Amino acid sequence: MATGYFSHPDCLAHDMGRGHPECAQRITAIEDQLRAVGLDSLMLPGDVPLASNSDLALAHDTTYVLMLDDFLQQLETTGETRALDPDTWACPGTRSAAWRAAGAAIAATDAVIDGRMDNAFCAVRPPGHHALHNQTMGFCFFNNVAVAARHALDVRGLERVAVVDFDVHHGNGTEDILANDDRVLMVGLFQHPFYPYTGAESKAGNMVNIPIPARSNGSVVRDVVESYWLYRLEHFKPQMIFISAGFDAHREDDLGGLGLVEADYAWITAKIMEVAHKHAQGRIVSCLEGGYNLSALARSVAAHVRTLIEN
């Protein structure tokens, strides 16, 4: 068994306009870097299906899913690009990308639970952790990690899963969907005050939100992981761990103000893997969230994936 890599060309078709930081080049930069560091054998073609609307309804309001489906199918027909909120635009390629991103997370979850892979990384876009139960937000249409976590619980029969979010922004959508679901523990850290200006006060006891100030470096983040995350994860004993893997806390990323480097992402990943090996048979599915400096993103993902492979 090995680490799985889940992506699909459809994820490149989503285009929010010239100069938008959440762009297709994010995926190509990651794959170029994986090849450059000798991890190209990881990127074997795999089966990445489109999620079904019933899959998406595990985490989202059914009416929202159907209305968004209808709207995006109209754009496929007309060729238009339209805004859904101030940050989130849709184009004719958005529907296939969004349904494929969630489908990749589900396929990775099944592969890991079935024992065909030890763990998996999903290089997908659009990202998901700002997508609310019934609303797009912050570049996100569907909450890929929340959909996959609910799939593991409601379809595959697991009893406890954890979500770990180290994006520079609070995963408000994941919290909106999973708060008060006692089968889930979510631990996160994020720059505060900062977009989306939430998370300083947790909505529920199963949410462990750790806001940290701008310009905090890796030593601060490592202290948060050891002082807050690991105790709660150890006590919860998750049977599977999902990672909202945002790399915009890197010191070279202008969309954030934190100071992480590649070694910090490798260290965080190793700590998560320690918990997974102890309680979850090593089962981890990691899904790409933020990260907008292409070089820093690619190097950080390579460090993250190499750790998934080697630890």
Image: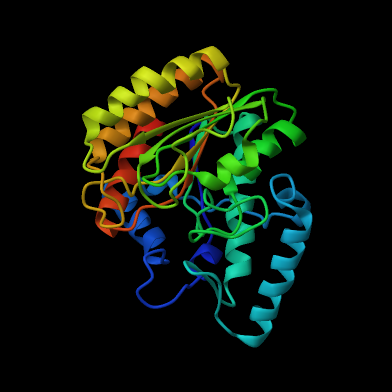
Q: In this rendering, does residue 47 appear at all?
A: no
* Residue displayed at 31% across by 33% down: 266
Left or right, residue 145 beside residue 159: left
Q: How is the image coloured?
A: rainbow
* Residue displayed at 71% across by 31% down: 153
* Towards the viewer: 125 or 115: 125
- In the image, is residue 158 above or below residue 39? above
In this rendering, the count of numbered labels is 0
Left or right, residue 281 beside residue 188: right
Quarter of the picture holding the C terminus: top left
Left or right, residue 270 beside residue 54: left
* Towards the viewer: 241 or 235: 235
Q: Position of residue 67 (x, y in %)?
A: 74, 67
- In the image, is residue 259 above or below residue 291? above
* Residue displayed at 65% across by 79% down: 76
Q: Position of residue 45 (x, y in %)?
A: 53, 53
Q: Position of residue 218 (x, y in %)?
A: 23, 33
Q: Position of residue 189 (x, y in %)?
A: 39, 35
Q: In this rendering, does residue 161 appear at all?
A: yes
Q: Residue furthest bottom?
A: 78
* Residue displayed at 31% across by 57% down: 255
- In the image, is residue 288 above or below residue 293? above
